[in-house]
Image (cartoon, rainbow, N blue to C red):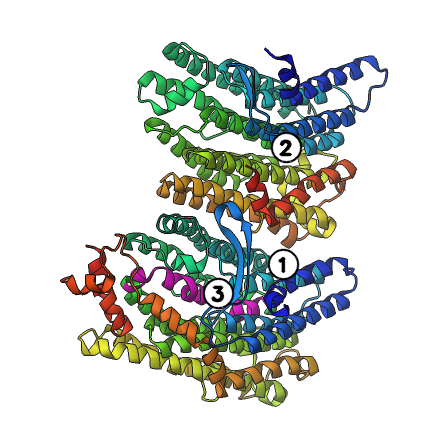
Amino acid sequence: MLDATLLNWVLFLPLVGMLLLIVVPATQPGSVRQLTLWVMLLQLALSAWLYVRFDPALATLQFETRLPWIATWGVYYHIGLDGYNLLLVVLTAFLGPIVVAGSFTAITKDVKLFYAMVFLVQFAMMGTFVAQDLFVFYVFWETMLIPMFLLIGIWGGERRIYATIKFVLYTAFGSILMLAAVIYLVMSAKGAGGAASFAFTDLVKANIPLSAQMFMLIAFGLSFAIKVPMVPLHTWLPDAHVEAPTTGSVILAGVMLKMGTYGFMKLGFPLFPDATHVLTPLIMTLAVVSIVYGACLALVQDDIKKIIAYSSISHLGYVMLGLVSLDLIGIQGAVIQMVSHGLTAAGLFLMIGMIYERCHTRDLAAYGGLAKLLPVYSVAFMVLTLASIGLPTTSGFTGEFLVLLGAFTAAWPQHLRGDSYPLVLAVLSVSGVVLGALYMLRFALRFLFGASRAPHQPLVDLDLREKLILGEILVAVFALGLFPDEPMRKTELAARQYQQLVTTSRSNVRPPVAPPSADAAAAPLPSAETNSAMPPSADVASAPTKDKQ
Amino acid sequence: MNWGTVLVGMLPEHLLLVGIVVLIVNDIARDKPSGASALSLVFVGAAALAATWLAFGGFVAAVFPGQLSITPGSSLAKAVVLALALPVLLLCRDDFEDSGPLYPLLLSSLYGIVLMFSSDSFLTLFLGLEMMSLPVYVMVLLALRRPQSAEAALKYLVLGGAATATLLMGVSLLYGLTGSLSMVSFARALASHDAMAVAGAAMVLLAFFLKAAIVPFHTWAPDAYEGASVPVTAYMAAIVKAGAVLAALRMFGQTALSGPMIDLLALLPLLSIVWGNLTAMRQGNLRRMMAYSSIGHAGYLFLAFLGNGPGRYGAVLFYLIAYGLLTLLAFAVIPRHADDARRDQLDHLKGLFHRQPFAAIALGLAMLSLAGIPPLPGFVAKFLIFREVMAAGYTTLAVLGLLGSYLGIYFYLRVIQFMFMSPQAATTAGEAPPRGAALTASMLCLVPTLLLAVFPGRVLGLF
């Protein structure tokens, strides 16, 4: 009985917390902080229980709830856990208490509103991940805008208004196109299946002509790509990160960017497989450009927050590369990389926040030799830096290595058939690892070593609260690096399902007269069905040929 | 004619009529007249209840055959409009004394609106439309605190007169063609390609565009909204607009459109969305901003007319409920200020959150919802409208309309930015938080708004 409603509790706890905040007087910021922290910890505990109880052998949704919401349109309040969202739900819940505890000393203005907004953003992000109905997904996806707008705009830095408006206008532009595509998709899916349905399971069965798939993938894809962000839609990110308070940056880098990649994995690619085939070279190119360009930009930044912001663009490029490689190992690598980046980037932003609280500057040139001034801080920072670079035994290594392995595995057969482009891209993406080491080590070298200097000396090293926060993250980073087996086992079925969905053509709008296999045998051109049996990304060129007939 | 049916079927109208008489008598007979606000609340409330009862009782009758008929749909529309009028009446308490001409005028205007919803012929429709509009001209003028009020009222009167003339011209063309004043002739003209029919229908439609402030017939709206006092502005924005759109909806019935009418109904509303939202960005004055915002919203509403079938009615009615509630909420919570012109400046909202958190949060919710950001009801309403447009096959138009709505996000968010992120306004003297009546009005809007956000399905199930 508890199991049936457990996911609802995890989802709605932040909202409950927000309502509880109303009765806490604004004059007691201490109680506001305590309340928020305990609610977040409870959410973490419940989601840990979810993780333990999640059965990796089941292909169906677990902890599912499905209630009619807008019955006349076929909209259901439908949530559930599967291999796609399991790790992201846990990651979101994991970062919740860390975000709250990390802002105890930094936020002194409008404390109550601040934590109310943190709750709201937590609610919206959790909802986006667990939603199994397109309408519900969209509602949560957009709801996230409001608290983020306020978080950056009220508690941000000097140019916070500019940054937050830019953030909202970028994301809202993607969302509005996605809304058009959502309506269109539900309309066209209805034509095939009878009653209108927003359920993901129904939508991935709909047959949609290639041209419509292209438009919708572009609309969905723009929205997701802005969120990821992929070059050239990334320009909002450095501004938002730099101006946001530490909390905002941690939420952005830790969870929100994954909403974009999750969107591609759960919706974008599986809903429109044929369009994905056509656009794979483009998406792959953009992913590699993001990896290399993001890394190059990180290399030349003097603002310590911008370094991590640009590194996020580079790291998420790997996630996209893994997803479009359509190789099982690459897909699983992408999933691990999402979580890994969530941990390391959140950790690094928190550490930058901690030093900023002490020294009030983000200028790299102002710092040096912190290893002597702040030994504990420096050790933690170095470990996170190495994890971000992808040192073996840390989570960063698992993710990036698997993605690259997957990219090469998928590219090699194509190379043998004469299409070397994917291989070239895979080779280029390796340079991201090298560049990553370069910019992070440059950062650490100037930051931690050399002559000791920092504004506002003497500096106090980490206190117990900060040690606990970072300790948690470091444990998670190593746990994921040393024992990636368990999470990979729990997400394997989803990765397989994703691979299967994206490699199956669904653009055949004519009602099938004969069984598909017979049809394929009779057809002079290679059909989509035969292709799906081949190595997945091999049919990039041939699948559309059939669709255009 | 069955007098029993007349008595029961037109109960909302009768209650309003009794209210008007009682209010006038109250004003004349008593030495120190007061209590007009309470009286009008009672009568409008009772009329709303009566309309609800008729709607859910499924009362169908041709009260005056060929002229006036009651259906559950028309009763529901009446109930919605009358219920929306309650917060307006509460708002009036702050700006007007508790007697005088405002209340009977407002009730007369409401009478005109409910009459339109039941009309079967152009004669009744015209009667209702004029009864709705004439009192509003006077109501705009009643805020004689500023010279602009007179100018605004005159502008509104002249353009309203033009709308009347256009409507009559269109009706006479249709009459010449069919020899009947029945509104069925309009529906037939919509589907026909005959030049005279198209011209007649187009002129009738344009008259409604003028009343609902669709580009390029929108120029009266910003001036009238700015010149009138806050409750009258709220009345025009929420209720007169709802009246005009719902009356047009009744006229259209469930006819499918064809040829030139489609162009008219696609192009001008789209232009309204884009122009309304673009111009709203530049306004420094809250009421003018809301006027341009309402021009944009009128655009969305008329886009839904492209769809045919039963979905059209539900989409438009839901949109009007959400839009009406949020517009009224916005007007109910803007802080009071002794100086009416200063009350209006957007700059004066700066730092409002620290002075009046409730007002800032409520106004923020209204802005977000008007911008169509989920999970607020404005989003569901927008979704409904564009679903109708796409279902009718106008995919490109829907995409353009959605992109037009994207333009609106900025100026709605700017209000929130002012209230939450900007330093305090330079002078805040003379500002007071919403009091008793206005607070009740804002709760009357806020609670249904939140319910609408959580259970949109329940409401949609009613239509």
- Can you give x and y, in whole percent of width and height, for residue A165 in the image? 53, 55
- Can you give x and y, in whole percent of width and height, for residue A66 in the image? 54, 58
Dot 2 crowding, Cα within 10 Å, few <14, some 14–19, many 20+: many
* Nearest to viewer (mark 1 / mark 2): 2
* Residues at marks 1 and 3, CA–CA distance in whole angstroms: 23 Å
* Same chain letter for marks 3 and 2: no
Give the camera-side residue of A452 and B355.
B355
Dot 1 crowding, Cα within 10 Å, few <14, some 14–19, many 20+: many
Task: Give the residue type at disc 2.
Answer: Ala
Give the camera-side residue of A215 and A531.
A531
Circle 3 sits on which residue? Answer: A259
Q: Is residue B300 left or right of residue A366?
A: left
* Residues at marks 3 and 2, CA–CA distance in whole angstroms: 40 Å
Q: Residue furthest left?
A: A524
Tag 1–tag 3 contact (CB < 8 Å): no
The answer to whether residue B78 is above or below residue A428 is above
* Residues at marks 1 and 2, CA–CA distance in whole angstroms: 30 Å
Circle 2 sits on which residue? Answer: B234
Circle 1 sits on which residue? Answer: A154
- Please provide the residue range marked out in magenta: A248-277
Q: Identify the residue at horizontal 57%, vertical 78% (top origin).
A: A52
Give the camera-side residue of A328 and B353.
A328
